Amino acid sequence: MTSTLTLPEGRTLTSSWPETPPGGDPLPGQLDRWLVARGAELVAIRRHIHAHPELSGEEFETAALVARTLTAAGLSPQMLPKGNGVICDIGSGDRVIALRADLDALPLPDAKDVPYRSTVDNVCHACGHDAHTTILLGVGLALAQLAETDGLPGRVRLLFQPAEEQMPSGAPDVIAAGGLKDVSAVYALHCAPLLPVGLVGVRSGPFTAAADKIEIRLTGKGGHTARPHLTADLVYALGRILVGLPALLNRRVDPLAGMSMVWGAVRAGEAANAIPSEALARGTVRTLNKEAWREAPELITELAQAAVEGTGADLDVTYTRGVPPVVNDRLATAVVAGAAGAALGAERVVEAEISMGGEDFAYYLDHVPGAMIRLGTGIPGASERVDIHQSAFDIDERAIGHGVRVMVHTALAALSAGAF
């Protein structure tokens, strides 16, 4: 099978996957040869996407590149209604397994001195979504060939999602467009720069936290600091909110829920001798427990009112939902763990740590069982360990091949499993 891909800058890539020899060939051997033939192409795609990042909701060129690549492989991708995401089925049959990747970049400068450095000011793939997209493309191309030889026991749906990094996120748009119709299970991976390349982290149960935003605004009569009794002392009231609200929350929520409230912005007045008439605090609320997440807005509003009671301040609480917690399905996790072991070796599958970061993959898990895993992308010998959401973030590009192997094995294993 030979295919030709033209990148937006006009460069053409031509490659082929060797035919399966008579008598059949184990999947690992097929993938090894295919990745030898097409690995350079996948790296080139990743670098192109990295150099041309697009912010949340604006992933039109990235989505178009994905669609062209899949079309060149004989597939029939469908664009999301806004044109910034792609859904594509491979194979046939009633059984459907979905694999998801996110397309968007972050509003950060690219601090790396590399040939594929971002060409867009203050926009950078500092979270690895360029790698996620490239890996899922590779999976799609590999599975397309298997489907041609009747080697795919069902359908695999590729979900290339926009706007993972913003609130509201793009996952509900994919779901509304039919992304989960007839799907039995859904899987995704995320780059993990603190995990060495070649390793995969899996975990059943809580995986990432819900991530919401809260804004508390206080108003009242200001005045001279010499006569605070004639005012509503908003600085004092705000102090009670900043210190007391997280403490009260910790005593009203089960510690096992892993709820965390952290302030990120505080503003109250300018002059040292004047009590302001307005004060503001913004922060995040995170939890690993779905029930605690559902109850958080009402509880936090109640506790905020209790914290300012008696100060004379008027309180307004704006609670903005972010994403639910990602809670990996037990059986889906077992499937992907076994698949990762088959793809890379059992010794390369390790237990993933729980993250308090947010991830909108949780929306898919509200509809169907599934699991997210961590793909090691750590660069051996790097002088410093750079985490995601940092301007110097980069990956060991060998992780692309590892990701393709793991997700191809996962799709086939999930299609063959009769448990979903």
Image (cartoon, rainbow, N blue to C red):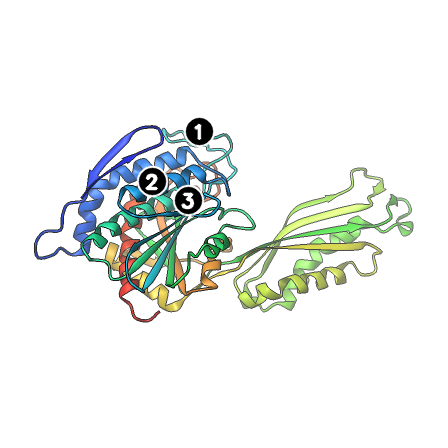
Q: Is mark 2 on a helix, strand or loop?
A: helix
Marks 2 & 1, CB-CB < 8 Å contact: no
Q: Hey, which residue is sitting farthest left in the picture?
A: 22
Going by the numbered disc 3, the residue's amino acid type is His
Q: Where in the figure is residue 213, as x and y percent of width and height?
A: 62, 52
Marks 1 & 3, CB-CB < 8 Å contact: no
- Alpha-carbon span between mark 2 and mark 1: 22 Å
The residue that appears at 53% across and 59% down in the rendered structure is 324
**Left or right: 13 in relation to 96:** left
- Please state, as top left, top right, bottom left or bottom right, where the C terminus lies in the image: bottom left
Residue linked to disc 2: 68
Q: Name the quadrant containing residue 300.
A: bottom right
Residue linked to disc 3: 129
Residue linked to disc 1: 119
Q: Is mark 3 on a helix, strand or loop?
A: helix
Q: Where in the figure is residue 9, as x and y percent of width and height?
A: 35, 28
Going by the numbered disc 1, the residue's amino acid type is Thr
Q: How crowded is mark 1: few (under 14 residues within 10 Å), some or many (20 or more)?
A: some
